[in-house]
Image (cartoon, rainbow, N blue to C red):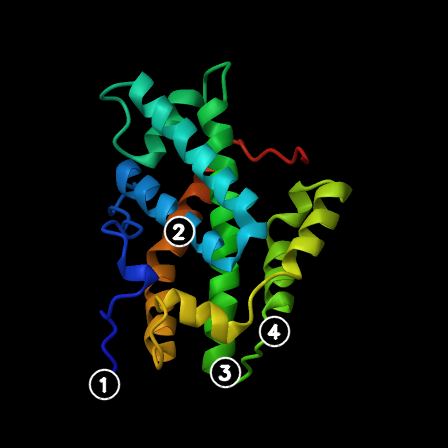
Amino acid sequence: MADVKAETFFTQSNSPFPGPTEDEKISADEFLLASTHLANFFGILGTVFTPVQSDIAGNVKKLRNFIEDNPGKVVYVNDIILLEANSTESIAIDALLWLKRALEFTMVFIDDIVCDSKNGTANEDLRPLCLQAYEKTLKKYHGWMVQQIFNLVSRACPWRRDLLLSLALGKTDMESIVLAQMEEVLVNLKKNVAIINRLYVTYNLNLDVKV
């Protein structure tokens, strides 16, 4: 039986995405730690994806600063929205929104890799999956120029075998383990994203401004 706890990119983080509480609250600290680690996934995809990694890191930093500026007031991600929902400022709300969107793109991309593998339809060329994830998540928030840039960036997406080898930290014969860990990461990531989406709908905070 494969050792799903074997060391890979996914086991390097001491803080996986947190399981929500019964009343759908998400630990802010654990969520931001997990987001920071998942941003490194784009470093593995290649240097052309560095802007995405930097964007995630930048939004995490904004949220960290917001928490520091509101000592004792933010325990859960939900608190960030509650504190700013009725404020004239929306720095943290915007940062969380764009962080969530980047996580959605990553989530869909990883999910598609897992599903293709399970369905026996895995293709070495991951570019179609990368573009598919982009079209499902980020594309509608980007202007024409950014969309063209992403189309070019997606062409540098590594081959499936190379990505899985990198995620296995260079160890061979780890494909099934890496895929199992991908699937495990998706469980709470999907829950976190779904809850944040519901919060933005509840407070009518979804902004369709393009960049």
Q: Amino acid at mark 3?
A: Asn
Expressed as whole percent of the image width and height from the top left, the position of residue 19 reads: 27, 51
Q: Which mark is residue 116?
A: none
Looking at the image, tell me whether mark 2 or mark 3 is earlier in sequence order: 2
**Which SS class for mark 2?**
helix
The residue located at (45%, 72%) in the rendering is 114
Instruction: Classify 10 Å Cα crowding around label 4: few (below 14), some (14-19), many (20 and above).
Output: some
Residue 136 placement, left or right of 24: right
Residue highlighted by disc 1: 1
Residue highlighted by disc 3: 119
Q: Amino acid at mark 4?
A: Asp
Mark 1 or 3: in front is 1
The residue located at (64%, 58%) in the rendering is 154
Residue highlighted by disc 2: 38
Expressed as whole percent of the image width and height from the top left, the position of residue 190 reads: 41, 55
Mark 3 or 4: in front is 4
Q: Nearer the viewer, residue 152 or 25?
A: 152
